[in-house]
Every structure is written in structure tokens, then in C-alpha cells.
Image: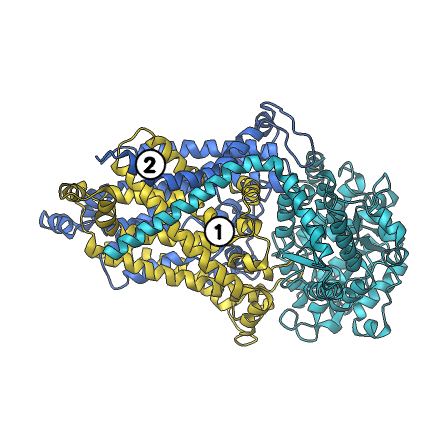
Chain colours: A cyan, B yellow, C blue
């Protein structure tokens, strides 16, 4: 009994002291806040001093390409290669953030405290936050002075991320060519070819249905990815206005005739041409329906290809049954990602140089090659060679690249062009659209409202 | 009548057992299924028992390091939390002082503060105190987050202890702390055990703050591991459920061990009425 | 009652310090910034009650969120607690199965939400889910009801992911029951009371405090419920399963309007305070025994 008492008292004391210590910290914190830049500055001078003593400069980097992410292996390899090449000079400290959502949320927290890592991917509005909070660095001057780097980034990727006043705050990490995959066996059995027009497409869906196949693998959960690719394709190939719309980031309104018309078609597709579980399904459900040979078509990018020969995901021999096609009206999603941003505006010159070095490495020829090889990520320019062996080993990716040359309409995804709040509305309202509780016009106006609220 | 009552109890408890057991069995079974099998439903194991999920789980996520951290954080947060709350609950129940209402309100606040609002301020606090990216930060946060629940449980339980026992101790010349430690604490064992389980689970399962308040893989806890299997286009649910089983088992063991305390507390307890 | 100031202060101090360190700054920021248009990268300016007026007049979703939150609080503080207490009473008479059932009933509480969300998505899947397969087997007709996103079933399906899982209530009540002396049961038996009468007239009144505590915990847990909703319905279809914490969360992370989010947060806290007051009063929790 006695021993327990003394233990408890010791414990209570320990708690009190920790708490007191912590408490002092908190009262002091308000004072410290104002001095924060000062302490940071001393840290910098130390860092610089350390640099002269040839200690490596540490730069911070955050990534969501971990765990089961398709690019996880490539990511690790590139970071390790960098740390090895710059051993003793620069060291990249990585923060792993599993899932895109977790990554975006944490970066939002860091952005509002002005403490984003030195290098990171600025997607889903993070780049805009970094510009707003003053951390982001304009990369245009650095691109101008480094011809070798510029060669592998390319005009296209640079222009894609250029602001109206000619600044470039991010370097894309990949080119995306997204068409759709189809089950060749089912197409043959139903006696159809990939459609050339949207009317033909809808007829094809009916033909497939009549032949006893479910035409489309759709989903409305998460970001409604496989559904919204069709939506983007319908808007982007409708006419010149629609194509312009799908190439505009943050459009003014979603109440356009092309968009409403496309939503109307999506409504039909959700009602008649997809699986019973599409409403509320997440990406994995849609992908699984296609990979298990239950559904004839899925819109998705080449990163899906490794799944087709993975027997824990697809039925045996599935890879041979898959074809890839352009959207009707010769459309293809072809865009650059937002890519990497440099958040060292308030850091020392040495740190900025080190971080820039890493960003160059990450977007350079070597990294693009690794990502292509290991993750099926398409390089930014043709200067990164895609070998014939690679094409032979990855026929669907090769075919996608080939199709890109034939596309008449190219455009971006909604995820890249719309505010996160707009994307969120899809998951909420697609079910109501599918169950006829709202109309395409209603949905367009909800999207526009979310768009307005985000400005 | 008696027969009907028994039948009702039997049916009711059977339903309870079924709805509670099915989720766990489903998770357990799924940890031996492939991704495709999980998503396509059904009961079978077409690929046999797919035990590779477990090796994948350990390969893809830093489970071992996270495990170690989780054990440290959960145990410390539970011990501190119970110490802090029991002391506070004791004086709130037994002593009379003016600020009682205020203290109760203070201990209740964690129940009604939206978690989304806590994230940013806590991040700033930990940055400013140099506790960011430390297990200490997590221990402190979880200790505080669990304060309301433990406090309420302890208050409720201490109220059931008759004051006469303590009175007798005081008459014998025992001091405040000694009375608390020798008379009150032993009697609150069942409540300790129950509050302890709840607090342990909080610290063991919390995800959002763990992710926000740490940066290094070496400083992170188990709930984060589960998200290593859920990426945008390449989730591996088989591995995720394998990891879930690995994460859940200690919780169940802790529960069973602590609940033994409740039962053995009976001998010491039995004071009410 | 003892009245030893030194010890009172020392016993309360750790809790007070911890509160100050973890919650105080948040509360101050929350309240203060709810009157501003705080967002990232813009000059902060005072906007008075604008945020409060906006959320009540312009956001249809917010009103739905409040309504849903209230219904969930009501259900959770009644049905959920009744289930938990009933099981506790049934298990209180030591039977061979008592410990096993109690442990099993608690298991859903130990599974982390990442797995629970996926579990519910899979078992409720309209096409392949366990539930629909069972229904199809029993009725002999194919069942493809979309439980989570059908506009009639969504709210109740989400509710069922937490309403019956009252293992926590059960263990809390059972822990306190363990303090009831056997003599009480003996005496009741001698007086000729049936077990049911003993439960209702003797045991339950003695449990008033802990049941009150359970109601407080159950009700306020609905002010924190977030991850299951996010993983299953995202608040949809429409706003049918939207609740206050989810709404606050979206305003913070999707819209990044911190001032507005914090006004919503203050409303959430106000709802919580009302709940606490009502429950504490109903269960006479502020009175001494």
C-alpha cells in the first residue's frame, strides 16, 4: 500500500512539473511570437555559419507519395539519389503525409502559420496559399538563367503555370494524358468500336447494356474522379466555348450551356449506364468494377495500368483485354500538373539555393526518367526519351502517347481547374442528380455558388 | 412471465453480440483477403488466406516505429490524465470552494470545442514552445483532450463513496493527501479502469492532431500508419485491414486487463447503499 | 467537508495549467476571430456580427447542419444511452456470458475510424455489400438499395453507424454498479421484489450520476462526429447528413474562411453549453447526494 502511495505522489509531482513547465511556455508564447523572426534569423546565421564549417544545409520537403501511392518507389529513389549526390552539402528532410487529403490539410495549417516546407507540391490551392502568405518564390528568373533545366521543363509546362503577370510559381511534376480504358472483349461481343461522337457514345452504352454488360464504371464519392473525367471530356469537346472553359482555371461560372448539357448526360449515365454501387462509390469501387471485368469502360490515366496485371486487383489475364481510346470528338485530357513550389522567400540565400537545387533535381531529366520508369508518369517534354523497350513493356502507355498526337481537342481536369469547394459539391449533389431530385441546372447553380464563395 | 423476460434478454443480447461481432470479424476476415475480394464482397477466400497482407502492411508503413511511439504516448497520456483528473475530481466533490462551477466548466470545455478549430492554435502553441514534433506534445494534448471524460467519470464515482470512511481517517489524524491516497484511491479502482480504457483509446486512435503536431516519421503514432494504404489511385485495403488488426489487438488486451480491475475492484468496493 | 485551501489549489493546479496550455489560446482565438474576416494572406479586418448573420441567413446548409446535429444529440442521449444501460442491467446479474458479452459489445469502440469507414462502405455497398446480400437471400429478390446515399435512408444509415454501439455506456454503468453492496440486492429479495423491480426502484436511482455522465458524453460526442460521415456520405446527398462539426471543418479546410468557421465554431460551442446545462439540470448533477 505504502509503495503505491509514494508512486502516486511521485506521479502527481511529475505531472505538476510538466504542466507547470508547459504552462510557462504558453504564457511566454505570446511574447515569443513577436520575436519569432528574430530567433529564426539567428537560426539562419547559425545555419550559414554551419555551412562554412561544411555541415550540410538541411532543407525540408513534404510528400504524399508514400505507402501504396503509385509513385512511392520512384519518390524514394529520387530523394535518395539527391541526398547521395549532394552528400555533405545538402540534406533533404522528408515529411511523409499519407493520402492526398492529409497532405493538403497539413499544408493548409502550415501555410496559415507561414511555415510551409522549402519544397513541396502546390496542388489543390496550396500554391495560391503560398503566394498569398508570401513564402512562394517566382521561379521564372531561375528558369531563364538555367538553359539545361529549362530544356527538360519545357515551354509548355512553364506556360501552363505562368500567372497573368508573367511569374512562374510552380514547376509541373508531370504531363497528364488521360483518355479512357475499355474492355475489348465486351466491345467485341457487343459489336462496337470506341465512339467518335457523343451521340454514338450514348448509343454504344445502350448497345452494351442490351448485350448484358454494364457500360461505365462511375463513382460519386471522394472527388467523383472517374465521373468527372467524362464530364470534363463532354464539356471540353462540345465546341470552342466548352473547350476554352475546360482550359480555364477558376472559371467565372458553371452555368454555361455546354456544362449544363454535359451534366444532363452525366445524369443519364448515372441512372442507366453504370453499376448499382456507383452512387457514393469511391475510386477503388469503380476501379475494382472495371478490373474484375464487370464493366466495359472507365475513364482514367495511365497510372492505372500496373493494376491490370496485378492479380490481387484484376482478374487473371486482364491486361490483354484492355484498350485505350480518345474521348468522342477526338478529345483528350492533356494537362500539366501544378507541380513543385519553392517556399523559401523568407529564408537565407544559402538555403534558397539549396532548396532550388533540390527542386531542379526533382523536375530534371533524371527524376522524370525515374518517375516514367517506376510509376508510368509521363515526362514534361520529349527531351526525356521514352525508349522502345519501355513502349513494348507498357503498350497502353505507349498507345496513350500516340493518341495524344491525334487529339483534336485537349483540355484539363476539373480537379485542376476548379476550387476545392466546387469539387466537394459534386460528391454531395451527384446522388440527388442521379435520383432525379435535382436537375442539371440546379447542380450547375450549386457549383457556381460554391465557386463564388471561394473567390 | 419469467420465461418471456428471459427470452427477451436472450434476444436482445444476441442482437448486441451480433452487431458488435460482425464488424470485427469482417475486418479480421478482410485482413486475409486480396483487394479485389474485399471490394467485390462475398464471404469466400478465392486466393486462399492471403497472409501477404501482413507482410505488405509492415513493409509499406513504418509500423514498428509507430508502435513504439503509440505505446509511449498512450501509456503516459493515460497515466497523466487519470492523475490530473482524479485529483481535481476529488476536491470538486469533497471540498467547498467558490470557483467550483468555473472548474467544472473548464473541465467540460474539451467536450464541446470543435476539433477543426483546435488544429491551428495547437500547432502554433507547439511551434512556439519548441514542442512541435515531440512525443511530449502528443502526450500533453491527449491528456488534455481526455480531461472532460475522465473528470466526469471520476466525479460521478467519487460521489458514490460514503464520506464516513474519510471522516474516520481524519479523526485518526490522517492528513489530506494521505486520506486521498489510502482511502479514496483504492475505492476508485473500477472507475480508474474504465476511464483508463477510454483515455487509452483516445491516445491510441487519434489521427488528425498526431499528423499536425509531428513531422518526422520517427515521431509518429499508429493511426497515421493506416493511411499509408489509402492513396488516391492505389489503395490496398487488404494491407489496411491487416494493419488495423495489428493496431486493434493491443486495445482489446488493454481493455480485458483493465476490466479485470473492475471485477477485482468489487472486493474493495461494495460500499454503496 | 474539508476546506484546505493549499491542497485544493495544488490538486486543481495541473488541470488548470493543462487547460490553459491546450484550450485557452484556442478559445480566445476562436471567439476573437469570429468577428473578423480572417483568411490566409489577407489583412485582418473587423466585420462585427457579419459572420454570424451570414451563416444564419445565407447558408441553407448550416441550418440543416444545426437541425441534424440536434436530432443526433437527442437520439444519442436517449436511445443510445438506454441501450447501454439495458445491457449493463442485463449483465449485472453474473452469468457465464456476462464478461464475454461486455467485452464483445466494447470491441466496435476500439476499431479506429479509418477502418470503420471502409468497413461500413464495404458492408453497405449496394451491389456487393453484406447487408444487401443477406436481404436478397432472405427475400429471394435482388436488393440493391443504396443505404448511404438514398435520400430516404441516408440519415438513418449514418445514424446506425454509431447509435447501437453503446459499449462505453455499458462499461461505465457497470463500473459504478460494482460499488453497490450485495446487501442491497439481498434486502430487496427479502422484501419480495422481482429483479425488474429491483433494477427500476433501487439500482437505477443509485446510478443517476453515472447515467447523467453517460448522457453528457453521448450528447457531446455528436458535436465531434466527423470522420465516419466524411468517409461514407461527405454530408450528402445534398446536405441530408451534414452536421455542425463537418460544416466547421469544410469552412476551415475547403473554403479557408477562418473567421466564418470560428463563428460557426462559437455556435457549436453554444449548442454544447445548452446541452450540458439541460442535462446537468435534468440529472441533478450539480447537487450533492
Quick one: quadrant of the C terminus of chain C? top left
Q: Is residue C63 visible?
A: no
Q: Secondary structure at mark 1?
A: helix
User: Which residue does the numbered mark 2 point to in the structure image?
Assistant: C9
In the image, what residue occupies the spot 46% across and 40% down? A23
Instruction: Give the residue at mark 1.
Output: B136
Q: Position of residue B32 (x, y in %)?
A: 52, 71
Considering every residue shown, the one lying at the far left of the view is: C190
How far is the residue under mark 2 from the one under mark 1? 25 Å
Quadrant for the N terminus of chain C, please: top left
Badge 1 local density, few (<14 within 10 Å), some, or many (20+)? some
> Residue B121: x and y, percent?
55, 40
> Residue at horizontal 86%, vertical 51%?
A143
Query: What count of labels does the image hold?
Result: 2
> Quick check: C50 left or right of C110?
right
Q: Chain of mark 2?
A: C
Instruction: Indicate the position of residue C78 as horizontal and vertical percent values.
Output: 36, 41
In front: B273, or A226?
A: B273
Q: Observer-nearest residue: A362 or B180?
A: B180
Q: Which residue occupies the foreground of this view, A415 or B243? A: B243
* Residue C76 position by quadrant: top left
Amino acid at each position: 500500500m505504502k509503495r503505491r502511495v509514494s508512486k502516486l505522489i511521485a506521479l502527481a509531482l511529475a505531472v505538476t512539473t510538466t504542466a507547470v513547465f508547459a504552462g510557462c511556455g504558453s504564457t511566454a508564447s505570446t511574447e515569443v511570437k513577436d520575436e519569432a523572426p528574430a530567433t529564426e534569423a539567428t537560426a539562419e546565421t547559425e545555419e550559414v555559419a554551419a555551412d562554412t564549417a561544411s555541415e550540410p544545409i538541411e532543407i525540408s520537403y513534404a510528400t504524399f507519395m508514400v505507402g501504396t501511392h503509385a509513385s512511392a518507389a520512384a519518390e524514394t529513389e529520387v530523394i535518395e539519389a539527391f541526398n547521395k549526390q549532394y552528400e555533405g552539402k545538402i540534406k533533404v528532410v522528408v515529411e511523409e503525409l499519407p493520402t492526398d487529403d492529409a497532405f493538403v490539410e497539413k499544408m493548409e495549417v502550415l501555410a496559415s502559420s507561414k511555415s510551409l516546407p522549402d519544397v513541396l507540391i502546390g496542388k489543390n490551392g496550396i500554391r495560391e496559399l503560398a503566394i498569398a502568405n508570401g513564402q512562394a518564390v517566382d521561379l521564372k528568373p531561375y528558369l531563364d538563367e538555367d538553359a539545361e533545366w529549362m530544356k527538360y521543363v519545357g515551354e509548355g509546362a512553364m506556360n501552363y503555370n505562368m500567372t497573368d503577370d508573367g511569374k512562374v510559381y510552380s514547376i509541373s511534376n508531370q504531363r497528364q494524358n488521360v483518355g479512357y480504358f475499355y474492355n475489348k472483349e465486351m466491345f467485341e461481343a457487343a459489336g462496337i468500336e470506341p465512339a467518335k461522337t457523343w451521340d454514338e457514345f450514348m448509343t454504344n452504352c445502350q448497345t452494351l447494356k442490351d448485350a448484358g454488360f454494364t457500360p461505365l464504371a462511375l463513382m460519386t464519392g471522394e472527388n467523383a474522379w472517374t465521373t468527372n473525367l467524362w464530364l470534363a471530356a463532354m464539356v471540353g469537346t462540345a465546341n470552342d466555348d466548352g473547350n476554352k472553359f475546360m482550359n480555364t482555371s477558376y472559371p467565372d461560372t458553371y452555368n454555361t450551356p455546354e456544362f449544363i448539357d454535359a451534366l444532363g448526360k452525366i445524369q443519364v449515365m448515372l441512372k442507366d449506364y453504370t453499376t448499382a454501387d456507383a452512387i457514393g462509390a469511391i475510386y477503388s469501387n469503380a476501379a475494382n468494377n472495371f478490373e474484375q471485368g464487370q464493366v466495359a469502360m472507365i475513364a482514367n490515366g495511365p497510372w492505372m495500368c500496373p493494376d491490370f496485371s496485378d492479380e490481387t486487383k484484376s482478374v487473371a489475364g486482364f491486361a490483354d483485354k484492355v484498350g485505350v481510346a480518345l474521348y468522342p470528338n477526338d478529345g483528350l485530357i492533356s494537362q500539366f500538373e501544378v507541380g513543385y513550389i519553392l517556399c523559401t522567400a523568407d529564408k537565407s540565400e544559402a538555403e534558397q539555393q539549396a532548396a532550388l537545387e533540390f527542386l531542379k533535381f526533382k523536375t530534371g531529366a533524371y527524376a522524370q526518367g525515374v518517375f516514367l520508369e517506376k510509376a508510368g508518369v509521363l515526362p514534361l517534354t520529349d527531351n526525356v526519351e521514352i525508349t522502345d523497350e519501355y513502349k513494348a513493356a507498357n503498350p497502353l502507355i505507349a498507345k496513350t502517347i500516340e493518341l495524344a498526337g491525334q487529339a483534336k481537342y485537349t483540355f484539363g481536369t476539373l480537379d485542376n481547374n476548379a476550387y476545392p469547394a466546387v469539387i466537394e459539391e459534386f460528391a454531395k449533389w451527384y446522388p440527388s442528380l442521379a435520383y432525379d431530385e435535382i436537375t442539371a441546372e440546379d447542380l450547375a447553380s450549386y457549383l457556381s455558388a460554391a465557386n463564388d464563395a471561394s473567390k | 412471465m419469467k420465461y418471456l423476460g428471459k427470452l427477451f434478454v436472450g434476444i436482445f443480447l444476441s442482437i448486441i453480440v451480433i452487431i458488435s461481432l460482425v464488424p470485427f470479424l469482417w475486418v479480421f476476415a478482410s485482413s486475409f483477403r486480396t483487394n479485389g475480394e474485399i471490394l467485390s464482397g462475398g464471404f469466400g477466400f478465392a486466393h486462399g488466406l492471403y497472409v501477404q497482407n501482413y507482410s505488405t502492411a509492415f513493409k509499406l508503413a513504418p509500423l514498428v516505429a509507430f508502435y513504439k511511439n503509440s505505446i509511449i504516448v498512450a501509456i503516459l497520456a493515460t497515466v497523466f490524465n487519470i492523475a490530473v483528473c482524479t485529483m481535481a475530481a476529488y476536491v470538486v466533490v469533497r471540498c467547498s470552494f467558490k470557483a467550483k462551477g468555473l472548474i467544472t466548466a473548464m473541465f467540460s470545455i474539451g467536450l464541446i470545442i470543435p476539433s477543426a478549430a483546435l488544429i491551428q492554435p495547437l500547432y502554433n502553441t507547439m511551434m512556439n514552445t519548441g514542442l512541435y514534433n515531440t512525443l511530449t506534445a502528443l502526450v500533453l494534448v491527449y491528456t488534455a483532450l481526455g480531461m472532460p471524460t475522465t473528470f466526469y467519470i471520476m466525479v460521478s464515482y467519487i460521489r458514490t463513496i460514503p464520506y464516513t470512511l474519510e471522516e474516520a481517517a481524519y479523526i485518526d489524524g490522517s492528513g489530506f493527501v494521505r486520506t486521498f491516497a489510502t482511502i479514496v484511491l483504492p475505492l476508485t479502482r473500477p472507475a480508474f479502469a474504465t476511464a483508463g480504457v477510454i483515455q487509452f483509446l483516445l491516445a491510441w486512435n487519434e489521427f488528425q492532431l498526431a499528423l499536425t503536431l509531428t513531422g518526422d516519421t520517427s515521431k509518429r503514432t499508429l493511426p497515421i500508419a493506416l493511411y499509408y494504404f489509402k492513396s488516391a489511385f492505389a489503395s490496398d485495403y487488404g494491407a489496411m485491414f491487416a494493419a488495423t488488426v495489428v493496431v486493434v489487438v493491443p486495445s482489446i488486451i488493454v481493455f480485458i486487463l483493465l476490466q479485470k480491475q473492475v471485477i477485482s475492484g468489487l472486493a474493495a468496493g461494495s460500499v454503496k447503499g | 467537508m474539508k476546506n484546505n485551501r493549499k491542497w485544493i489549489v495544488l490538486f486543481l493546479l495541473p488541470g488548470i495549467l493543462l487547460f490553459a496550455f491546450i484550450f485557452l489560446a484556442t478559445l480566445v482565438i476562436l471567439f476573437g476571430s469570429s468577428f473578423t474576416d480572417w483568411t490566409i494572406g489577407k489583412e485582418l479586418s473587423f466585420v462585427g456580427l457579419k459572420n454570424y448573420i451570414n451563416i444564419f441567413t445565407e447558408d441553407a446548409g448550416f441550418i440543416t447542419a444545426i437541425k441534424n446535429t440536434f436530432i443526433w444529440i437527442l437520439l444519442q442521449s436517449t436511445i443510445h444511452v438506454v441501450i447501454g444501460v439495458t445491457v449493463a442491467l442485463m449483465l449485472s446479474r453474473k452469468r457465464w456470458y456476462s464478461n464475454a458479452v461486455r467485452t464483445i459489445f466494447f470491441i466496435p469502440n476500439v476499431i479506429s475510424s479509418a477502418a470503420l469507414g471502409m468497413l461500413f462502405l464495404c458492408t453497405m455497398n449496394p451491389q456487393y455489400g453484406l447487408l444487401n446480400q443477406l436481404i436478397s437471400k432472405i427475400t429471394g429478390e435482388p436488393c440493391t438499395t443504396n443505404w448511404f446515399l438514398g435520400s430516404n435512408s441516408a440519415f438513418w444509415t449514418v445514424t446506425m453507424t454509431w447509435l447501437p454501439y453503446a459499449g462505453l455506456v455499458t462499461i461505465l454503468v457497470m463500473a459504478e454498479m460494482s460499488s453497490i453492496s450485495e446487501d442491497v440486492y439481498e434486502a430487496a429479495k427479502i422484501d419480495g421484489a422481482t429483479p425488474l423491480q429491483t433494477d427500476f426502484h433501487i439500482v437505477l436511482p443509485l446510478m443517476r450520476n453515472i447515467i447523467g455522465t453517460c448522457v453528457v458524453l453521448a450528447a457531446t460526442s455528436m458535436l465531434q462526429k466527423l470522420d465516419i460521415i466524411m468517409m461514407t456520405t461527405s454530408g450528402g446527398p445534398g446536405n441530408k447528413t451534414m452536421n455542425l462539426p463537418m460544416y466547421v471543418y469544410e469552412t476551415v479546410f475547403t473554403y479557408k474562411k477562418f473567421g466564418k468557421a470560428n463563428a460557426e465554431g462559437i455556435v457549436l460551442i453554444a449548442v454544447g453549453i445548452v446541452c450540458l446545462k439541460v442535462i446537468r439540470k435534468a440529472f441533478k448533477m450539480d447537487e450533492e447526494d
